[in-house]
Image (tube, rainbow, N blue to C red):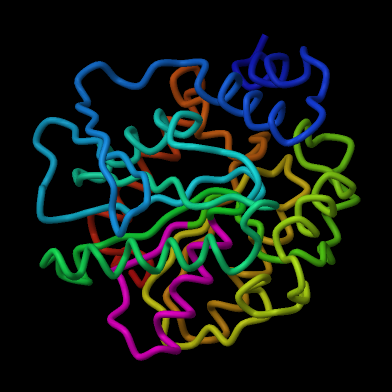
Amino acid sequence: MAEIDKVRGLLTGLPRPVGWAERRARIEQVAAVDAPPPEIAFTSTTIAGIPAEWSTAPMADARRVLLYLHGGGYCSGSIVSHRGLVSRAGQAAGMRALALQFRLAPEHPFPAALDDARAAYEALLAEGIAPVDIAVGGDSAGGGLTLALMVSLRDAGRPLPGCGWLVSPWIDLAMTGATMDSKDAVDPLIHRGYLEELAAAYRGAASADHPLVSPLRAELGGLPPILVQVGSAETLLDDAVRIAGRLGAAEVPVRLEVWPQMIHAWMLWAGRLAEGRQSLASAGAFLRARGLVAAG
């Protein structure tokens, strides 16, 4: 059996959870099934009053930071669920990684998560970390939040990070991409009805077309280099392809990687999935170079 099929079995072998508490527990159960590399050190902290966790691999450059915004549809996901992915990404990039526990919907709808991400980024700047030495990344909803953060910083005239990294990004909360339906039968995780529920919980009174809710609809010019990675077996494949095209049309240096047979946020299972490790290595090279490889 292929490694990706074993991951699929892990995800489909249990009934879907019901309610926010069960969903939050389930993502930690299935996404944190593998321990992070033993050589990585973890330190709990707060930044701008927000819970967070540093992960530092041996030989990491302490002057450089990956600010990571986890996935989970804005309603679940945590430091625990994404510890393996975040720490492995920082290790691959040769920098410290900071996982942020931003506030979740429906208790805290838009713009709470964006406000937390912005506050954490500004706090890193206040600590003396140069903007070019900060990379911002995230998977799924965290990918959309990453892009919304950069747009909001640009619009406010604030210094932008050195580069951005979007993994299986959810950047269209109106779900207008064609693969939302054409890939439904092969995606074991993400389906239209589920996303509609998450979108309603997150956006609150805001429209799904708000450019900071659905950054597919934002003006994108002037952003730093961005890497977009997505699996071919995702209902969100079209989100990744469309945002890469829109970034390119806006003259933003961008690189799109579509990984065959991979599912949503497959890097979460890099401990047991070779393609997860390979895609993290590719992302690490991009982050090390501050995205300059995107224009090469």
Q: Nearer the viewer, residue 279 or 78?
A: 78
Q: Is residue 238 magenta?
A: no
Quadrant, the N terminus: top right
Q: Quadrant of residue 243?
A: bottom right
| Nearer to us in this view, 129 or 268 | 129
**Residue lying at 82% horizontally and 34% vertically, measured from the top left:** 186
Taking the view exactly as shown, the residue that stands out farthest to the top is: 1
Residue drawn where x is 64% and y is 35% of the image: 262
In this rendering, the count of numbered labels is: 0
Q: Is residue 294 above or below residue 3?
A: below
Where residue 222 appears, as percent x and y from the top left, is 42, 87
In-image side of 239 versus 246 (left or right): right
User: Which quadrant of the rendered structure holds the C terminus?
Assistant: bottom left
The reply, left or right, for residue 242 in relation to residue 176 is left
Residue 59 versus residue 28 in the image, above or below: below
Front-most of residues 48 and 141: 48
Residue 77, quarter of the rendered image? top right
Residue 139, how many percent across, how many down? 54, 48
Q: Residue 162: x and y, percent?
A: 28, 69
Q: Residue at x 83, y 44 (%)?
A: 194
| Res 229 seen here | no
Look at the image and give the residue range highlighted in magenta.
143-165
Res 245 visible: yes
Q: Does the magenta-highlighted stretch encompass residue 160?
A: yes
Where does the image place residue 173, in percent across and percent down from the top left? 75, 64
